[in-house]
Image (spheres, rainbow, N blue to C red):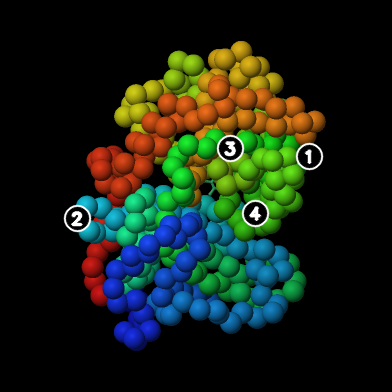
């Protein structure tokens, strides 16, 4: 792929390594450039890196009206050799195409996606924030640009990648367990729907639920299946729990659960973590009874942004509260977080191919 570089001049762009004094937070900052590529006349064309900034889009663009848009979220880390490495980016590229297929967006060759992201990180590598537990958050997305008000898949799209220099997700350490609202009112996905796609619209549909969660003093909603019988996932994280023998259980992936790459990684690491990690259908009644009997001792969420989010308690819409263990972060949850983040930071060698060097080209 021949990428066209239209870079900022040296005086406009970062020329020294980014060394923020304070935690830059998660997702707040942008780098100097973005990657763009368009789909027209049945093919992806015109790959280019341009200064980060607003784009022109037709007011009738399909993405704006009918939500035909998908995205990904991945991270890159700096290792002790001072090089930047992406974490399992091939899995994100594969998933972007799976998500795209669910809402009729044409696939974009995975190797092209990887090349695009690597080239962009290479150009903006000085933006890697030099602080403890930092990363470059990578946000690839595709949206429908055809100017047409009738409802059918767009004939035109834009693929874009932006980067966000991010600090530690847990600014005061990995110590606070969150509360989740178990809702029988809000549902994230239905069988045959778009739940297994990282489609923009799924997030629009979760905003009201997020507000309701806040009203209950909860961080987010734990979604049940449409019949309110099974535990599915959290709006931007898969769910897990730990049995008293240390077994980690993640709900079985279905078309109403987004297949988290963090979850898949924990499943693959099992042995390294020193425990059994498996998937099963999780029934709400049994889940709550097992927490109350002490059979379940820890719980939490898995997702790229936080990696692991410990859950200390659940609240129901009738205000009933169920506390997991002693309500604090448990040792298994801590260990999972430690092992996975050590691999990402290059402190421990992970499975073959998980970390990929971002080559220096420019
Ligand atoms: C992105 C996302 C996740 C987490 O997936 P990761 O690959 O681990 O980041 C979980 N659930 C939903 C609904 C998501 O959109």
* Mark 4 element type: helix
* Sequence-earlier tag: 4 or 1: 1
Q: Residue at x 73, y 40 (%)?
A: 216
Q: Residues within 10 Å of mark 3 (few under 14, many from 20)?
A: many
Q: Is mark 3 within 8 Å of ligand 1?
A: no
Residue 195, can we see it?
Answer: yes
Q: CA distance from mark 4 to mark 1?
A: 16 Å
* Sequence-earlier tag: 3 or 2: 2
* Residue, disc 1: 185
Q: Nearer the viewer, mark 3 or mark 4?
A: 3
* Mark 2 element type: loop
- Rendered image quadrant of residue 317: top right
What's the mark number on residue 203? 4
Nearer to us in this view, 213 or 285: 213
* Mark 1 element type: loop
Q: Residue at the top extreme?
A: 293
Q: Residues within 10 Å of mark 4 (few under 14, many from 20)?
A: some
Q: Residue at the front extreme?
A: 21
Work out which quarter of the rendered image holds the N terminus and state it: bottom left
Residue 197 locus on image (x, y percent)? 58, 51
Task: Identify whether 174 is placed above or below 88.
Answer: above
Q: Is mark 4 within 8 Å of ligand 1?
A: yes
Residue 71 locus on image (x, y percent)? 53, 59
What's the mark number on residue 178? 3
Nearer to us in this view, 305 or 106: 305
Q: Nearer the viewer, mark 3 or mark 2?
A: 3
Q: Residue at x 38, y 56 (%)?
A: 135
Q: Answer left or right for 2 relative to 107.
A: left
* Residue, disc 2: 81
Residue 32 locus on image (x, y percent)? 41, 75
Q: Residue at x 24, y 59 (%)?
A: 83
Nearer to us in this view, 218 or 87: 218
């Amino acid at each position: 792929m021949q990428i066209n570089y239209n870079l900022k001049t040296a005086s406009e762009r970062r020329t020294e390594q980014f060394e923020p004094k304070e935690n830059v937070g998660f997702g707040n900052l942008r780098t100097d450039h973005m990657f763009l590529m368009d789909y027209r006349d049945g093919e992806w064309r015109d790959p280019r890196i341009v200064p980060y900034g607003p784009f022109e889009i037709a007011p009738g663009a399909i993405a704006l009206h009918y939500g035909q848009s998908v995205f990904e979220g991945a991270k890159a880390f700096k290792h002790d050799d001072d090089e930047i490495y992406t974490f399992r980016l091939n899995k994100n590229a594969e998933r972007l195409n799976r998500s795209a297929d669910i809402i009729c967006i044409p696939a974009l060759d995975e190797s092209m996606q990887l090349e695009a992201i690597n080239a962009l990180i290479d150009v903006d590598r000085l933006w890697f924030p030099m602080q403890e537990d930092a990363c470059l958050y990578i946000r690839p997305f595709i949206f429908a640009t055809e100017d047409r008000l009738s409802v059918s898949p767009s004939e035109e799209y834009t693929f874009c990648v932006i980067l966000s220099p991010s600090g530690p997700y847990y600014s005061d350490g990995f110590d606070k367990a969150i509360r989740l609202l178990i809702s029988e009112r809000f549902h994230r996905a239905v069988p045959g729907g778009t739940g297994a796609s990282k489609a923009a619209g799924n997030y629009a549909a979760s905003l009201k639920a997020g507000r309701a969660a806040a009203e209950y003093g909860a961080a987010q909603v734990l979604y049940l299946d449409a019949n309110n019988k099974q535990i599915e996932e959290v709006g931007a994280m898969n769910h897990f729990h730990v049995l008293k023998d240390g077994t980690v259980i993640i709900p079985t992936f279905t078309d109403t659960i987004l297949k988290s790459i963090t979850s898949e990684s924990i499943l693959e690491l099992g042995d390294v973590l020193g425990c059994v990690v498996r998937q099963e259908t999780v029934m709400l009644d049994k889940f709550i009874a097992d927490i109350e009997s002490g059979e379940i001792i820890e719980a939490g969420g898995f997702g790229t942004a936080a990696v692991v989010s410990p859950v200390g308690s659940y609240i129901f819409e009738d205000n009933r509260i169920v506390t997991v263990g002693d309500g604090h972060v448990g040792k298994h949850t801590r260990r999972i977080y430690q092992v996975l983040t050590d691999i990402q930071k290059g402190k421990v060698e992970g499975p073959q191919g998980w970390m990929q060097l971002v080559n220096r080209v420019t």
